[in-house]
Image (tube, helix red, strand yellow):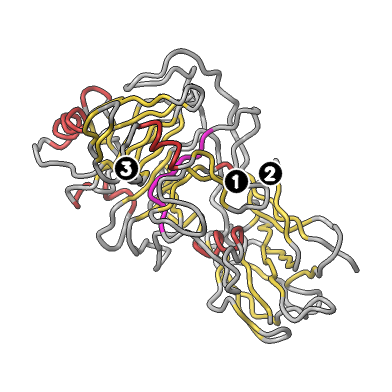
Amino acid sequence: MSIQSLLLLACLQTSPSVPGGGAIGLESAAGGPPRSMPVFALASVSADSRLRQDPFVGPQGLIRLEDGEPWAKIQFPQQAWQALWGDLDGDTWADYPQGIDALDLPPRADGHSATLLDLLYSMDRDGFGWKDGDILGFDSYGQPLAVVYEDTLVQALGLASGGIDIDALCLQEDGSYWFSLRDGTQSTFHGGLEDGDILSYQPNTGLTSVIATEAEVQVWVQQARGSSQAFGDLKSLARHPHTGVLLFTIQSPSSDDATVFTNQGGGFALNGWEEGAWKFQVSTEVDALCFPQDWCPQYPILSTDLSHLAPSTPFQIRLKHATPFSLMRGRAASVQTIRRSGQGGLGVATPGIGGVRLHWPSAQEYPMTTDRDGMATYDGVTPPLPAGTSSAWFSFQLLDLGGGGISTPLRIRLE
């Protein structure tokens, strides 16, 4: 039977939209009354780390921390990036960013709830035809798409030579991009720029400006910490989704390199978002961070040890962060397209043209049910290859029937 899988990526919005308006300032952005949704953040880490329920978190993945939750969890692992990106360089291995050092998930202009396909991000190094100074998003196939090119920013900043590395990012209500640089540089328009400056680029006019200097940020950090120690590099920029106040993280000292600060009132650590709130099990620096204004649930996470397998051979898929004691239903398919949708979570679905689709567990297998921690494993057999092919990529995903949504995708190559 001819079937095409459709990979859907979406987040449910559980609170009403809030009207915007007014000028954007350093301390707050006008935006109406506070939202009722819980405050949560998405973040990346600068090096391999470990969380309470996630023994490995790399700089390629995104983690999530929500107000009231006891610890952070993985939200979008490396293997989910690989499922979206696929094989970009033709070496038969699914690709992924080596690190994410700038991140934002702004609300959509069309009024629909933002999804993870609306992420803005910058990679920590050049690769796959993109630069570490590009501001990237996803195209309609889930692959990298340059929203603002590094060369555009270099020209807008008036740099005589060389490139830049975007190290913090926050899209403002007026359409301007606030950002910071990994390294200092010399601008013909602004003079010496430091890696702690907050800069702005307005694409409508092509103009850049300095929103706050490193010295000003140092004053905020000094008041918040009660210490004159230099904060090093500005690592991330964000807006609080309820109040609109400016939020940021810093490089030094290591005891506060995962603490979220605000410049409100001259500089404070954001209550409940200190270093220890993440519950990192090793010393960890937050590299990129954003506070989305639209609600995204905690996705069930799929993982596997082997990404290349022979057809019709045994394999295992693991599941975590799903609803406890919940029944799971999975699908796999050999052809993948991607679109934005109003459905929650990430999913493989919908008949189409071409390819192979199957359900797992099959009708002949025991149902898959999570334990009290929302975890489960599936031991099955890989699908056969589509007729007339010697290799194929298969996408796997699960629906949490207990209300946890659809899992992150997993992509396996059969050959």
| Magenta segment, prevailing SS (helix, strand or loop) | strand
Q: Nearer the viewer, residue 72 or 414?
A: 414
* Residue 175 image offset from top left, x and y in percent: 50, 26
**Rounded to the nearest whole Å, what is the CA distance between mark 1 and mark 3?**
33 Å
Q: Identity of the amino acid at label 2?
A: Arg
Residue at x 34% of width, y 64% of height: 48
* Numbered badge on residue 117: 1
Mark in the foreground, 1 or 3: 3
Q: Quadrant of residue 263?
A: top left
Find out whether the residues at labels 1 and 2 contact each other: C-beta distance under 8 Å.
yes
Q: Identity of the amino acid at label 3?
A: Ser
Q: Nearer the viewer, residue 307 or 240?
A: 307
Q: Is residue 399 found left or right of 233 in the rendered image?
A: right
Let me know if residue 125 appears in the view: yes
Residue 185 versus residue 61 in the image, above or below: above
* Numbered badge on residue 340: 2
Q: Quadrant of residue 161?
A: top left
The span picked out in magenta is 99-106
